[in-house]
Amino acid sequence: MNWLTNFVRPKLQALVRKTEVPENLWEKCPHCGQMIFHRELEAALRVCTHCGYHMRIGCRLRLRLLFDDGAYQRIELPTGAVDPLKFRDRRRYGERLKEAQARTGEADAIVVAHGRMGGNGVVVAVFNFDFMGGSMGTAVGDGLIAAARLAVLQRAPLIVVSASGGARMQEGILSLMQMPRTIIAIDEVKEAGLPYIAVLTDPTTGGVSASFAMVADIAVAEPGAIIGFAGARVIEETIREKLPEGFQRAEYLLEHGMVDLVTPRAALRDTLIRVVGLLRNPGPPSAVLALPAADAGPIDAQHQHGGSVAD
Ligand SMILES: [Zn+2]
């Protein structure tokens, strides 16, 4: 664009990065505490090679992992989170937004892309947890609506990969309004007869779990992902009871019928391709009945007719 963005910024970023590299050669698994070499960890798609713990991944890596050859087209989203309350806690909301935008290089907590997956066109919306905890404000609502409309326009399935702490409280009631808004967006996809698949990753909580994330045709979760509305500690304090082992984890939700599949990251793409294939191509329902009619005599044709009525 200009001298500042093309020349000065890359130089500055290169300076900052140099100091980061040596420290990050080994990463500690937050679950088992083992050290993993960074290349090994990247090769394992950021899944711990010792205990299988699924670390969070960024939205760009997620998109690369899902699309054929890692190739996809991002769409431009309506810009701008709003700050209707001129909200301020320790810092202004506007400042927090700018800081998150500068750090992640993204406009807000959602990215929408389309491309091919297993040869089929799909629209994928991915939450960016690095951006203010993937919280859902107006911009995220706008993003989901754009994704849903794009899916309808392209007659393509919609896949939403969620990773969110919930509604963005800085936007007050407008953030809560994104819950019905996104539900309506998803309804547009369903009314068009297109599949909607949710991929619930760690964490999917609050207003996101209480809206579009839970109304998918097929809900796939990553192993160990926390999925729930209120935090476990808050629930424990409220009901004054010990919560069961594994509460709000993907596997627990699977056992209780809240998700359909728990799929390791390495198998996620193939699983989604299979699910999309099943939902999009159910196969001709009465192909067997139609076949003999072509060269059948009158009696046979009658049998055929009787058969189809009985069915
Ligand atoms: Zn581990």
Image (tube, grey):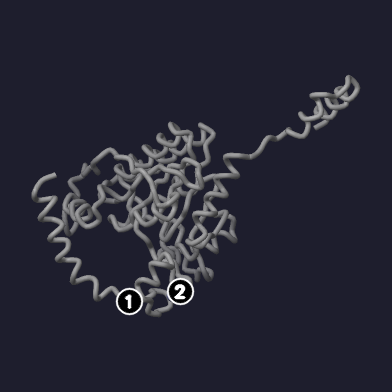
Q: Residue furthest right?
A: 299
Q: Secondary structure at mark 2?
A: loop
For residue 284, the mark is none
**Rendered location of residue 168, percent (x, y):** 30, 50
Ligand 1 within 8 Å of the CB at mark 2: yes
Can you say whether 35 is above or below 241 in the image? below
Q: Amino acid at mark 2?
A: Thr
The crowd level at tag 2 (other Cα within 10 Å; few <14, some 14-19, many 20+) is some
Q: Secondary structure at mark 1?
A: strand
Which mark identifies residue 49?
2
Residue 102, image x and y in percent? 19, 54
Q: Which residue is pictured at 21% across the width and 44% down the height? A: 83
User: How far separated are the C-alphas under marks 2 and 1?
Assistant: 13 Å
Q: Quadrant of the N terminus?
A: top left
Give residue 86's position: percent from left, percent from top: 17, 46
Instruction: Report the image quarter containing ligand 1.
Output: bottom left
Q: Tell me the quarter of the image containing the C terminus.
A: top right
> Which residue bears the numbered disc 1?
26
Q: Which of the two residues, 184 or 59, is positioned nearer the viewer here?
A: 59
The percent position of residue 44, horizontal first and vertical second, equals: 43, 67
Would you identify the image quadrant in which residue 203 lies?
A: bottom left
Q: Is residue 68 left or right of 73 when viewed as pictured?
A: right
Kindly identify the residue that appears in the image at 39 percent across and 54 percent down: 64
Whichever of labels 2 and 1 marks the residue nearer the N terminus, that label is: 1
